[in-house]
Image (cartoon, helix red, strand yellow):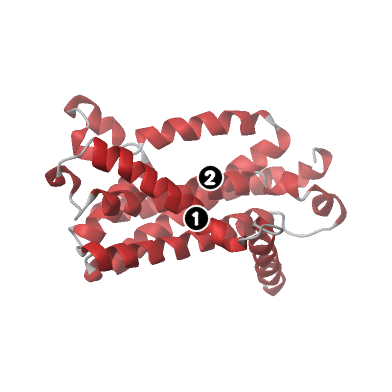
Amino acid sequence: MNVALNLFTAFTLREIRSRYSGSVLGLAWAFIGPLAMLFIYALVFGTILKPSAENLGAPSYIMFLAAALWPWMMFSDGLIRGMGAIKANASLVRKVAFPHAVLVLSAVGATVTLHLVGYIAVLAVLAYLYGGVLLGGIPAALLVIASLILFTIGLALLLAALHTLLPDIEQATQPLLMMLYFLTPILYPQNVIPEPYREWFNWNPLALMIQRLREHLFGQPMLNIIDGIVMLIAIVMLLIGYAVFVRLSPHFEDFV
């Protein structure tokens, strides 16, 4: 257990240090890119399209967007990096005997750490500028974030195992993530979805997580049954992903 924890810590720190090594601004790029996306989306959707404040359930569109954009980046970036972690460390996998899952966990862990720091900083600044964040909802929001992290780890483990044996997984994941991005109410409030299709959106675990995050931060600080369902989905995804990973892990050396 201690060996695995030490490996996880070492690989995570290495991942963070190497992410922007050689660049002039270094880790600042972890915040510059997401901030640029935030302000571009806020300009296009918040200023030009001017969504109704009643539909948002947030003090402003930029806060409405920020509450969902960072968790999405945490998920998508963590998934992509976790999925490619075995291939990216092929020499280690071939030469050293250690739990291969640590590579996926460290890739996701480094990504989550960077985006979580940015998420907290941006929400704090926007709360200072616009107000409206419910301090009592922060613990419940953190529980939803924990569900998102577990869900990301589980799916990353599943895709990392499949991708190592079948490279086509990487080609399919990018367009599927793009589709999922627009099918998740990140840029728009869920209540603008036409009623016949709204129930289908609720089958998307990420849509549930995003919705609950906004409700905890801006409207409903108390936990309810949906938060339990979200956590259960995340745990099931983690167990499935880990089981598949462990089953296929002994064959990785033959494919990397």
Q: Write down the quadrant of residue 7 in the picture.
A: bottom right
Q: Nearer the viewer, residue 44 or 212?
A: 44
Q: Write down the quadrant of residue 189 in the picture.
A: top left
Residue 142: image location, x then y, percent:
36, 64
Residue 70: image location, x then y, percent:
42, 53
Mark 2: give few (<14), some (14-19) or many (20+) Cα within 10 Å. Answer: many
Residue behind mark 2: 155
Task: Kindly identify the residue that appears in the image at 61 percent across and 49 percent down.
Answer: 82
Quadrant where the C terminus lies?
top right
Circle 1 or circle 2, nearest the eye: 1
Q: Earlier in the sequence, mark 1 or mark 2?
A: 1
Label 1, secondary structure: give it: helix
List the single residue furthest toward the left: 54
Spatial CA distance of label 1 from label 2 is 27 Å
Name the amino acid type tagged 1.
Ile
Q: Is residue 118 above or below residue 197?
A: below
Label 2, secondary structure: give it: helix
Residue behind mark 1: 32
Q: Are marks 1 and 2 in contact (CB under 8 Å)?
A: no
Quadrant where the N terminus lies?
bottom right
List the single residue furthest toward the bottom: 2
Name the amino acid type tagged 2.
Leu
Q: Write down the quadrant of residue 29 in the picture.
A: bottom right
List the single residue furthest toward the top: 196
Whether residue 235 appears in this view of the structure is no
Residue 197: image location, x then y, percent:
24, 27
Whether residue 45 appears in this view of the structure is yes
Task: Kindly identify the residue that appears in the image at 21 percent across and 65 percent down.
Answer: 131
Residue 195: image location, x then y, percent:
17, 29
Task: Kindly identify the residue that appears in the image at 68 percent across and 74 percent down.
Answer: 2
